[in-house]
Image: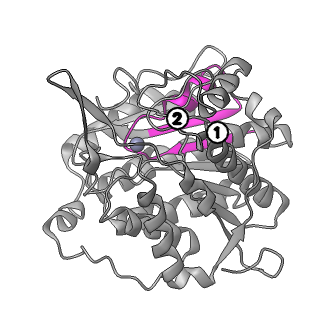
Amino acid sequence: MRSIDTARHVLGYAYSPRLLAHDPPPTTVDIAGRPFPLGTANVSHAVLTAQAHELVTRSALCGVLVAVPLTPAPEDALLAVHTPAYLERLCAASAGGSWDGEYAPVTPATWDAARLTAGGVLAAVDGVLDGRLERALVHARPPGHHAEPDRAIASTYLNNLAIGAEHARARGAARVAIVDWDVHVGNGAERIFWDRADVLAISLHQRDWYPAHAGDLRATGGPRGEGCTVNVPLPPATTDAGYLLAFDELVAPIVRAFAPDLVLVAAGQDPSAFDPTGRMLVSAAGFRALAHRVALLAGEVAGGRLVVSTEGGYSPVYNPFCLLGVLEGLAGTDGGVPDPWAGDATVRAAQEPADDRVRDAVAAVRRVHQRWFS
Ligand SMILES: [Zn+2]
């Protein structure tokens, strides 16, 4: 990987093996009054992050990427999004104190890893705002898009991209757009920026999934932020073409109308065709196409300023190839690692055209939002 000082065409990549220290134990379920650990379903396992990074380093992209150094996010950046009491509780829980996060177990390494990941987003945002990076991807661990100001949810503790958005605003960016294609609802950004018109929060997600009762298309923002929360609930088994349809018909025109100075992407790979936590059908090629689309869009509306941060992604066999697809789309070049599952029936199904259910879902969101963007 190249040094940031010597690079010219620069796609930043923020990652540190120190993030792997955050490695919560497997989830347990209660069976006959005793905890039963679901070891093979440990969606928080550090190996998922480690092997995706390993594939990146073995790909041709390694010669293209520029390492973005990670330093822990300073307290004032965290306080722009999270409450002081919550941050104290999270820090104390890492040190052994009590904890009550929803599906968000804390280990002794959680506080440091979370601050380091948020710091990676800040460094990436600074890099693109300063023009040292054209765009950047943060390989986040832990991810952040469910985290709310005062609570941790579903493996997320600090809302990395919200922290990045506030940082960009403080540096003079007038408007920031967040595009979230994780299979689960981007409830964190929705709550944090609900009543604001300076941050656009778009969430593409599987309908009626997680968190429960979140992500309804009629949730469009508070009185001062009407139209700046965009929920796009998509039906199960939405394919590559379905996601691209939603991008072309909703994300692109809405972001164009908003005219942000910076685009942030919450890039979950859990809409993938093999993901155990979702029921969508996106292939590695689909992720590549989505990332390429968003890079073109950022070039069109935001001077190319784009920071992508990873979110969920839990298929041990497919997640690394999906992450590589995202990086290929951002780099506009091939990583030289063919999708080993490309001939599989599941991946072929992911390349089917968008069906009427998806078209109807996209049209329903368009009807709600067209007053603001057309
Ligand atoms: Zn997710």
Residue 111 marker: 1
Q: Residues within 10 Å of mark 2 (few under 14, many from 20)?
A: many
Sequence order check, earlier mark of 2 and 1: 2
Q: Is residue 189 above or below residue 335?
A: above
Residue occupying the point 59% across, 30% down: 96
Residue 176 in the magenta stretch? The answer is yes
> Which of the 4 image quadrants contains residue 32?
top left
Residue occupying the point 30% across, 52% down: 242
Who is closer to the viewer here, 104 or 179? 104
Answer with left or right where residue 36 lies relative to residue 313: left
Q: Is residue 190 above or below residue 112?
A: above
Three-letter code, disc 2: Val
Q: Quadrant of ligand 1?
A: top left
Query: SS for tag 2?
Result: loop
> Which of the 4 image quadrants contains residue 177?
top right
Residue 326 in picture, x, y percent from top left:
48, 65
The stretch of residues the image draws in magenta is 174-203
Residue 267 in picture, x, y percent from top left:
49, 52
Residue 295 at least partly seen: yes
Residue 223 marker: none
Quarter the N terminus occupies: bottom right
CB within 8 Å, label 2 to label 1: yes
Who is closer to the viewer here, 248 or 118? 118
Q: CA distance from mark 2 to mark 1?
A: 8 Å
Three-letter code, disc 1: Trp
Tell me the residue that label 2 is attached to: 106
